[in-house]
Amino acid sequence: MYRVRQQDLPFRGSSHHFVGASNGDVNVSVFLFRGLPGAGPGPHRHPYDEVQFVQEGRANGSSTERNSKRGLATSSSSRPARSIAFAASERHRWFNSTSI
């Protein structure tokens, strides 16, 4: 088991980052997002599963690829969420959809 406190995670951009590959070769990365409404990364992909927890507001996400084999679902723009997950290698984007 790996334990880490939020304040011990690196803070870059608008998120605290737990990158699994840098922490005991865990195959998932977790981000605690604190960005402003409308903020979020553009389309991207990475070799690990990603879970975003939006600390304030809601997240909307989209994926250009579905990875039903992995069973990870993405949030649609009609269903904002406080957390959102994407499978490894899935091209995706998401943003804080809270109104300004």
Image (cartoon, rainbow, N blue to C red):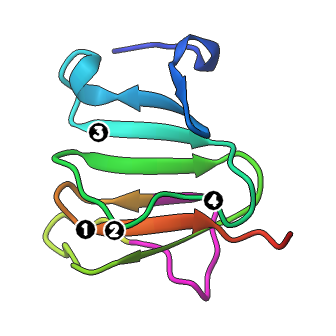
Is disc 3 placed on a helix, strand or loop?
strand
Q: Which mark is residue 17?
A: none
| Nearer mark to the viewer, of 1 and 4 | 4
Q: Which of 68 and 64 lies nearest the eye of the viewer?
A: 64
The amino acid at mark 1 is Arg
Is disc 1 placed on a helix, strand or loop?
loop
**Residue at the image point whose x is 20% and y is 54% from the top:** 88
Sequence-wise first label, 3 or 4: 3
| Nearer mark to the viewer, of 3 and 1 | 1
Q: Are marks 2 and 1 in contact (CB under 8 Å)?
A: yes
Q: Is residue 5 above or below residue 78?
A: above
**Residue 50 point in image, percent of width and height:** 35, 49
Q: Is residue 54 above or below residue 42?
A: above
Magenta stretch encompasses residue 50: no
Q: Are marks 3 and 4 in contact (CB under 8 Å)?
A: no
Estimate how packed mark 4 is, as few (under 14), some (14 to 19) or many (20 or more) residues with alpha carbons within 10 Å. Answer: some
Q: Is residue 43 above or below residue 11?
A: below
| Nearer mark to the viewer, of 2 and 3 | 2
Total numbered labels placed on residues in the image: 4
Q: Which residue is mark 4?
A: 39
Magenta span main SS = loop
Q: Report the magenta residues as a range.
A: 74-84
Q: Real-space Cα distance between discs 2 and 1? A: 4 Å
| Nearer mark to the viewer, of 2 and 4 | 4
**Residue 19 point in image, percent of width and height:** 34, 29
Q: Are marks 2 and 3 in contact (CB under 8 Å)?
A: no
Q: Which residue is mark 1?
A: 91
Question: Quick one: quadrant of the C terminus?
Answer: bottom right
Horizontal relation, residue 15 to residue 70: left or right: right
Q: Which residue is mark 3?
A: 28
Q: Which mark is residue 92?
A: 2
Q: Real-space Cα distance between discs 3 and 1? A: 15 Å
